[in-house]
Image (spheres, rainbow, N blue to C red):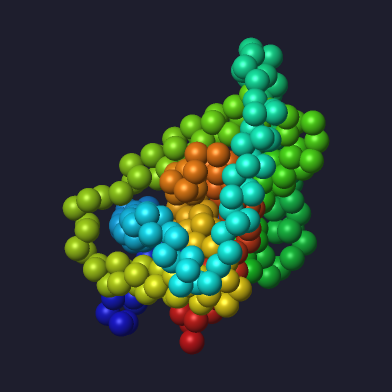
Amino acid sequence: MPESLGASGADEIWRGLATIAGSWIGGGANQAAMLEVFQYNPEKYGGMVLVDIVVANVWMAIILLGVGRSDRIDRWLKADNSSIEELKQRVSEHNERITRPTQLRDLILLFSLAFAGVGAAHFFGDLWAGFLEDNFAVIRDKDQVLSSLGSRFLWMVVIATSVGIGLSFTKAKSFEGAGSSKIGSLFIYILVATIGMKMDIGRVLENPSLILIGFIWIGIHAGLLILVAKWIKAPFFFLAVGSQANVGGAASAPVVAAEFHPSLTSVGILLAVFGYIVGTVGAYLCAILMQLASTV
């Protein structure tokens, strides 16, 4: 559909679809990273946010309908859900063991680690991006596919994510018992709200073919998940929560997990965090592929 997808410069559709790839592989932070890296036209970005919201929420509604029929779906998948029952028990015991009242000291240390990590990500992200631009002509040339590797925001997100992963292997992980995930979820909702504020409802029908593209994407996503779940006989829980960890991110994966059992909320958060880890790299590769396809 060249009449729908044809554009040039900052209006190129692949740039906008890169932001959706970021959102559906990882979450809001990855979506924001792709917007900064590929510089899609901010005036048209609202249309991409609309596709993200409409299609992702339709799919989430389908998944939530399936939760009420999970036993029947598990029988069709020939899945053994005894592992889910065991998981419920283990997570409940773990949460009871680590939960403690949140103290002022916990909040001070949490925010200190967060701001120090973000500061380090900004500093080293600028340093590394500058090094790449100074030493590699392919990155300095804005007409080259790999020029986006010179984006400071891209490396800032990568380093900040790496810092978070690194801290999870230290004693800092004990802050989970003091409610660190709840604080993190608050900032995720703030991020999602700032993204949503860029949406222009008046442009809903400006390019309906984008909605169609979104449903094609989510249809392939759903088909692959069902095929693999049937093949490996995975319980519907993993299909549903795994899907939302990508498409919905940390804002909705815990909600879906909690529909199965409240103790499984942390599993949804964990899978969503893993989505954030791979989201920037996955969306970047996806965008490069779309950029190459757009030039054929």
268, 68: nearer the viewer: 68
Q: Is residue 212 above or below residue 243?
A: below
Q: Report whether residue 169 is seen.
A: yes
Residue 234 image-quadrant placement? bottom right
> Residue at the spot x=58%, y=41% of the render?
266
Residue 144 percent location from the top left of the image: 60, 72
Residue 295 percent location from the top left of the image: 48, 82
14, 280: nearer the viewer: 280
Residue 232 percent location from the top left of the image: 61, 73
Classify residue 214 as left or right of residue 78. Answer: left
Residue 122 image-quadrant placement? top right
Residue found at the far bottom of this picture = 296
Residue 170 percent location from the top left of the image: 80, 35
Q: Is residue 50 above or below residue 232?
A: above
Total marks in image: 0
> Residue at the spot x=51%, y=57% of the render?
237
212, 46: nearer the viewer: 212
Classify residue 232 as left or right of residue 4. Answer: right
> Residue at the spot x=76%, y=54% of the render?
131
Q: Report whether residue 250 is seen.
A: no
Residue found at the far top of this picture = 104
4, 54: nearer the viewer: 54
State which quarter of the image contains the N terminus: bottom left
> Residue at the spot x=49%, y=81% of the render?
293
